Image: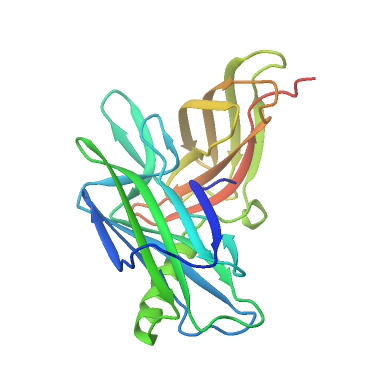
Amino acid sequence: MRFGSIVVLGLLSLSAISVAAQEGPHVRARLVSDAAELVPGSTVRVGVHLVMDDGWHVYWSNPGDAGLATEVSWQVPGGLEVRELAWPVPESFDSPGGIASYGYGHEVVLPIEIRMPGDPPGSADVTAAVGWLACREKCVLGEATVEMSIPVSAGEAARGRELLDAAIAAAPLTTGEAEFDLRSVTRVPEGERAGSMVAWVSWPEPPTGEVRWYPDVADGLKVEEVTAQTRGNLTRIDANVTVMNDDAPTAVPSVLVVERSDGHRTGWRIDVPVRDTTN
């Protein structure tokens, strides 16, 4: 599953100016880490921490009907192995005219893991170039380049661990960790370029909050006019799908989310069939 536009580059040296944090229009960006030391073969975590002004939001990997996906380009020293982690589940922002977008309000941490080699350096500089679109009544483009040298102090590592733990806990679970059943009943017919998609989710018990379905980016597929309606222990998901080319996937990666009234969101990564196989 794709989460935003993330690029990892291995560098022997970094010429970027060291910046602890940067502030763009209505968004502040910094790096956080839980690395108090660099141990041979260990794994440390680093994340981009974005804090938005009240009422402003930035976007998920799929911004929805409008918006622009948040992008992160990572730079790490050569020899360090980087693994992308899933971003926290998004939330919905509804605009006049029925426009729905997906993203994050207040704050979000976008994490990665870095594995140290058998003989790790004494310190390592990590840089992230971040680009976003921040919206409220209007939208403003922003960008920042933030850098951190790890390991960090024990106090910084403790604060970073708290933020990274929360971000990872808010990431979507796998389908194997879910108790619901997914059934696809309507797809774009074979050979056609556009049509509707209908899927049903059967829960063991009625969900404890509002159910939302967030289609992620799928090259060759355009998924629009998404709705999720729940009654009792059944949720119906509807969407209009456009097949852009013959190589487009037959299922769209997505996140199914239950959002409680207190704002807590639990999500699962699922692939939902949206079109029949094209020979």
Above or below residue 34? Residue 51 is above
Q: Which residue is rendered at x = 65% and y = 33% of the image?
A: 251
Q: Closest to the observer: 20 or 46?
A: 20
Residue 221 x, y percent position in the rendering = 58, 27
Residue 127 x, y percent position in the rendering = 43, 63
Residue 249 picture quarter: top right
Q: Residue furthest right?
A: 279
Residue 134 x, y percent position in the rendering = 28, 43
Q: Is residue 128 left or right of residue 256?
A: left
Q: Which residue is rendered at x = 46% and y = 30% of the image?
A: 227
Q: Closest to the observer: 27 or 238?
A: 27
Q: Residue furthest top?
A: 192
Q: Closest to the observer: 117 or 189?
A: 117
Q: Which residue is rendered at x = 20% and y = 35% of the image?
A: 138
Residue 155 picture quarter: bottom left
Q: Closest to the observer: 171 or 157?
A: 157
Q: Is residue 141 left or right of residue 215?
A: left
Residue 27 x, y percent position in the rendering = 25, 53
The number of callouts visible is: 0
Above or below residue 104? Residue 245 is above
- The answer to whether residue 149 is visible is yes
Above or below residue 71? Residue 18 is below
Q: Quadrant of the C terminus?
A: top right
Residue 33 picture quarter: bottom left
- The answer to whether residue 85 is visible is no
Above or below residue 211? Residue 145 is below
